[in-house]
Image: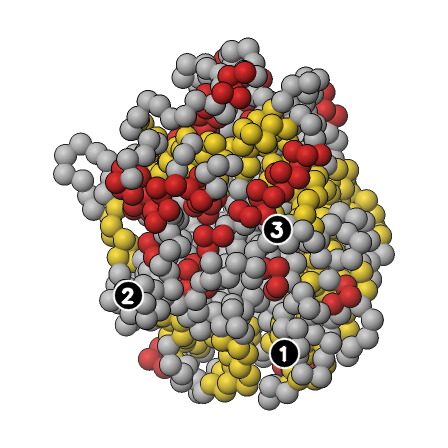
């Protein structure tokens, strides 16, 4: 619902003087042509989506001119072939399932091929099927889906989790594929995947003190967070203690008495927050002795990369190959301290072998974790962004993250990577047999600092090797058994190319090169990569600029900043090719220039850059955004810097309101969606990680969080501001926006408020409506034109 608190606001004289013709429904329809649901299918033959198989081959699917293609690749022989006849399989599947499947719209997952190569099994939705590769026969398959390491859209790969049976709980499947565990009534249950017999294996789990619970407060699911030992006999997990933790209350909009929703949701400064008690479950022991509680105090619900312990497979917790020991990392509540520990799986004894302390916040990797427990080497890999690591070269003055090898007594052995090759982003693979580590690096000299490259380094020290030489952003998927990897590389303005390489970087074969000819035929043009100077006048900042595809000579275009300030990511997001980036491309076609700029305080470029505004969250990279926009306006005469707008969602919503209040003379129109405007009202880990703990300053009743919120600056508003929020947002509670509303009312300010009833953080099926209202708001107040009345987006139903 729209709550207009006033009809006015300041009229933009400049907009009136340069106002274009009326913006029509036809103009909106033209812009809509460049949203994802209209342009993604115009990119053919890329990117890939698929998985490696146990025998070293892999399959992938890709959209071609005639629909999806499924390809089977044997990298050892450098061969590829159709995985099956799509037309025959679609016909056979339709007959067996009793419903129509079309060859040009056949979306399969979890493919597996029989030993003789005659049949292929796969999932369609939640049902698994087995079909002849050459014959027109299919039948239902009750065998579990295979473990997979994803290729392509799955990022850098990772162990898949079983989906569970239709209507059943998600299953965490053992490596041998014979057993799985799931959560029921706060306890873990074991399922035999052959007999389908279920056995309860923990018994003391109760509400808010359950086993393997996936609940970080701001995000949760019903899957079990466990790590199976390599031999499938043991499970590493935890009992998550949320007893006494503060609650978030959500009230749905409905007729009659609403059903209150209660969610555990700790806040910064709370005395009691979520903790975990680590356990090992040994399934070879008698039932009453299976749960071994590790002999240590409860850990904070934190990791080296975030507070979501389900963020990445194996993150911070890894088994020894024989399952006798567990290596893991404990993280302090404020992310300033890390402890590397080893647990004896039989006794539960825990030994702390190293402690690392930092001044601000420890970042243990960006695209994935970097800690690796290497008992075969009697060592572990550790990541540090410290400028000075005793006896080592360190990460240079920029704090570029590097990998170091320590023995299992915590003694530093050697530095593994070099700051001359950039900033280590994540560890992809460790080959203990050949004493090598493969890792992703950013801030690589001579390349865009956000492009990800694959390197190899010896655990024995020495020269590192660049394995992906193309000046582009690379996404990597390794064969789990080694030998090969799939490399898909692209840039924001160059479509993806996918190849197979050996682990030495040698090109084996080219798989696909994306064809964007259909996309280009619509008039589409890629965004323009831009580089400007940061607030310090020295540091280069990188971003993308979206313009109307046809610029009118002599015309000035309003300038819109699409912002996400981080600190855990940035405005631009991936540097890989994308036909659509939200609605930036579409919005530009209405007569705007849209810019995304990664300011200082965002990751991938070392700790000094990342910690630019540590402890000062109201910074929001805004000094860089304003300076960068002014530099671009001086460079491109078609930009009207006097008509500057801004919008963003979540952290971007916070930054937008911040900009409208603290930079009110620069930003004239802002749209703030679901912003975490006050870190005291957002989940505990966010503020405590990037601002430190909320403690008294000794001045009046002030704390270290005083002066950081948007409501405290709301009186500075001068331009047009639209605030939006979903009323059932369980990530950023709606009170964040209502606190700003209250402050604006008290300051007697005009603004607009759009509440989306019963919608979560991402707005769900109201997203198209929010997008249309966003377009309307900029057209009306920044462009100075009248938008078409109640234009309806035409997203196709799939």
Q: Which numbered dot is residue 715?
A: none
Q: Mark 2 and mark 3: span between their CA atoms? A: 33 Å
Q: Earlier in the sequence, mark 2 or mark 3?
A: 3
Mark 1, residue position = 380
Question: Mark 1 packing: few (<14 Cα in 10 Å), some, or many (20+)?
Answer: many
Q: Nearer the viewer, mark 1 or mark 3?
A: 3
Residue ID at (42%, 64%): 688
Identify whether 599 is placed above or below 241: above
The N terminus - image quarter: top left
Identify whether 326 is placed above or below 360: below
Mark 2, residue position = 700
Front in this rendered view, residue 255 or 229:
255
Residue ID at (19%, 43%): 259
Mark 3, residue position = 535
In the displayed structure image, the side of residue 40 where residue 341 appears, left or right = left
Q: Earlier in the sequence, mark 1 or mark 3?
A: 1
Contact between labelled residues 3 and 1, with CB atoms less than 8 Å apart? no
Tag 2, which secondary structure?
loop
Tag 1, which secondary structure?
strand
Q: Mark 2 and mark 1: span between their CA atoms? A: 47 Å
In the displayed structure image, the side of residue 414 where residue 304 appears, left or right = left
Residue ID at (70%, 53%): 538
């Amino acid at each position: 619902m729209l709550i207009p608190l006033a009809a006015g606001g300041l009229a933009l004289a400049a907009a009136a003087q340069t106002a274009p013709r009326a913006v029509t429904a036809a103009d909106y329809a033209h812009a809509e042509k460049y949203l994802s649901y209209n342009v993604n299918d115009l990119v053919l033959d890329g990117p890939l989506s698929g998985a490696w198989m146990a025998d070293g081959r892999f399959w992938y699917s890709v959209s071609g001119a005639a629909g999806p293609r499924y390809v089977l690749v044997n990298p050892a022989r450098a061969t590829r072939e159709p995985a099956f006849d799509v037309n025959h399989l679609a016909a056979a599947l339709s007959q067996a399932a009793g419903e129509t499947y079309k060859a040009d719209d056949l979306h399969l997952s979890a493919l597996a091929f029989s030993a003789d190569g005659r049949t292929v099994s796969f999932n369609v939705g939640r049902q698994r099927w087995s079909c002849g590769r050459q014959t027109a026969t299919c039948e239902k398959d009750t065998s579990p889906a295979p473990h997979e390491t994803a290729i392509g859209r799955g990022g850098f790969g990772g162990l898949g989790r079983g989906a569970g049976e239709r209507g059943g709980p998600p299953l965490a499947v053992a490596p041998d594929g014979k057993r799985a565990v799931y959560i029921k009534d706060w306890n873990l249950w074991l399922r035999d995947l052959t007999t389908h017999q279920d056995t309860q294996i923990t018994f003391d789990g109760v509400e808010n003190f359950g086993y393997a619970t996936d609940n970080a407060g701001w995000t949760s699911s019903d899957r079990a967070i466990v790590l199976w030992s390599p031999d499938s006999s043991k499970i590493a997990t935890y009992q998550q203690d949320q007893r006494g933790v503060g609650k978030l209350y959500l009230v749905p909009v409905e007729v009659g008495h609403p059903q209150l929703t209660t969610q555990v949701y700790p806040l910064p400064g709370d005395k009691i927050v979520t903790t975990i008690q680590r356990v090992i479950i040994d399934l070879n022991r008698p039932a009453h002795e299976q749960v071994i509680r590790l002999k240590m105090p409860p850990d904070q619900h934190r990791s080296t990369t975030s507070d979501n312990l389900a963020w990445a497979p194996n993150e911070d917790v890894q088994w020894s190959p024989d399952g006798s020991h567990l290596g893991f990392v404990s993280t302090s509540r404020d992310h300033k301290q890390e402890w590397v520990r080893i647990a004896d799986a039989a006794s539960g004894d825990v030994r702390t072998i190293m402690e690392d302390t930092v001044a601000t916040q420890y970042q243990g990797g960006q695209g994935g974790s970097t800690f690796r427990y290497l008992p075969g080497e009697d060592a572990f890999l550790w990541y540090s962004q410290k400028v000075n690591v005793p006896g080592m070269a360190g990460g240079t003055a920029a704090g570029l993250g590097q990998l170091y090898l320590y023995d299992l007594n915590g003694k530093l052995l050697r530095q593994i990577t070099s700051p001359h090759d950039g900033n280590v982003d994540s560890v992809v693979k460790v080959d203990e047999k050949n004493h090598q580590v493969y890792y992703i690096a950013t801030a690589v000299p001579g390349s865009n600092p956000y492009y990800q490259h694959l390197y190899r380094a010896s655990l024995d020290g020495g020269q590192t090797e660049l394995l992906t030489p193309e000046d582009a952003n690379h996404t990597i998927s390794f064969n789990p058994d080694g030998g090969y990897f799939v490399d898909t590389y692209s840039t924001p303005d160059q479509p993806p190319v996918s190849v197979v390489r050996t682990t030495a970087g040698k090109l084996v074969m080219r798989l696909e090169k994306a064809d964007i000819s259909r996309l280009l035929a619509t008039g589409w043009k890629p965004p323009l990569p831009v580089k400007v100077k940061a607030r310090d006048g020295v540091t280069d900042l990188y971003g993308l600029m979206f313009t109307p595809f046809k610029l009118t000579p002599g015309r000035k275009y309003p300038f819109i900043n699409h912002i996400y300030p981080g600190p855990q990511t940035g405005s631009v997001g991936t540097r890989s090719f994308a036909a659509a980036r939200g609605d930036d491309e579409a919005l530009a076609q209405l007569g705007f220039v849209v810019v995304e700029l990664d300011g200082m305080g965002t990751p991938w470029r070392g700790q000094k850059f990342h910690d630019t505004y540590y402890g000062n969250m109201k910074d929001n990279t805004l000094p860089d955004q304003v300076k960068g926009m002014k530099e671009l306006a001086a460079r491109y005469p078609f930009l009207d810097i006097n008509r500057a707008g801004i919008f963003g969602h979540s952290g971007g919503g916070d930054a937008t309101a911040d900009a409208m209040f603290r930079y009110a003379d620069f930003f004239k129109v802002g749209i703030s969606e679901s912003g975490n405007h006050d870190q005291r009202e957002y989940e505990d880990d966010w503020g405590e990680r990037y601002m430190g703990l909320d403690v008294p300053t000794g001045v009046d009743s002030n704390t270290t969080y005083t002066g950081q919120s948007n409501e405290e600056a709301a009186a500075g508003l001068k331009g047009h501001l639209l605030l939006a929020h979903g009323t059932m947002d369980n990530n950023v509670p709606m009170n964040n926006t209502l606190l700003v509303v209250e402050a604006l009312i008290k300051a007697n300010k005009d603004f607009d408020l759009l509440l989306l009833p019963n919608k979560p953080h991402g707005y769900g099926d109201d997203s198209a409506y929010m997008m249309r209202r966003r377009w309307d708001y900029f057209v009306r107040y920044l462009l100075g034109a009248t938008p078409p009345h109640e234009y309806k987006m035409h997203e196709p139903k799939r």
